[in-house]
Amino acid sequence: MKDKVKPPIIYKFVNFKTGVLDILINGNIKFSRPSSFNDPFDCYEELLEYKLTREDIIKFAKERNFVITEDQINDVFLKNKDSKNEINELFLEILKGQKDNTWVSCFSKEYDEILMWSHYAEKHKGICIGFSTYNIENRNLLHVDYVNDFEKKVVESNSFDVKPYDYWLKTKYIKWSYEDEVRVISSNGNEFLQFQKNMVKEVYFGSEVEYSDIIKTVNNLKKLGYSYTIFYRMLKGNNNFSLSREKIIF
């Protein structure tokens, strides 16, 4: 299967205050640990299975900056020199800890998904910000795959590539597919990422945001340097369950 093409714009759904003040005015995108996400199967450690030797474990831990001690390794191999189950259990515990050392920011490929506005944008009273992906490396941008049943990806001896860990980061249950999610992984482990204003291509205001608040906010943002950003407000459909956009011109 070919890699998915990087979308030109990815969308961040947030409440009004966070979107305007924290992101657009302060210029920061927040990253979170997967352990804080609302899906208990997000970055589920059981997605991976390890089949490694003692030497593999030492090398692997160093290359991945995993926190593992000689005592932990020795304990596994002293109990049962050939126990693959023990090795796997050890790494599953380490992987749980990795959730606290991994930072992810979640986006969508869609700006008009009703459930995204309802769940993540303050019940349509928030905003949706469209960021250009031009300056984001492909390695740090992952398309989420939605599945009914997962298969374990095996990490084998002398196989230290990133594919199993991408799989761990991007595999979710099919019921979440309405999010059409794209994930940006922090390469430096920081909780916040500063961005340039020219990365913000579009800003959408929810259908329940007062129009006077929209005009006031747009005026302020243009003064702050968002002169090339296109602003829209979302409108509820008259004849069906849908959202459309209206460009804000004044």
Image (tube, grey):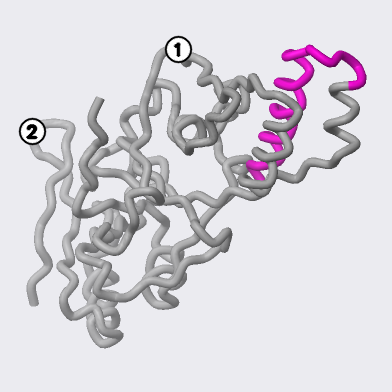
- Residue flagged by tag 2: what amino acid is it? Asn
- Indicate whether residue 85 is drawn in magenta: yes
- Going by the image, does 168 lie left or right of 177? right
Residue at the limit of the structure toward the bottom, as seen here: 223
For the residue labelled by badge 1, is the local secondary structure a helix, a strand or a loop? loop
- Residue flagged by tag 1: what amino acid is it? Asp
Nearer to the camera, 42 or 165: 165
Q: Which residue is mark 1?
A: 149
What residue is rendered at 25% in x and 39% in y? 113
What residue is rendered at 88% in x and 30% in y? 74
Q: Which residue is mark 2?
A: 239
Question: Mark 1 or mark 2, which has the lower sequence index?
Answer: 1
**Residue 61 position (above or below residue 87):** below
- Going by the image, does 230 lie left or right of 34? left
Q: Please provide the residue range marked out in magenta.
A: 78-100
Q: Position of residue 97 (x, y in %)?
A: 71, 40
Q: How many residues crowd around disc 2 within 10 Å: few (fewer than 14), some, or many (20 or more)?
A: few
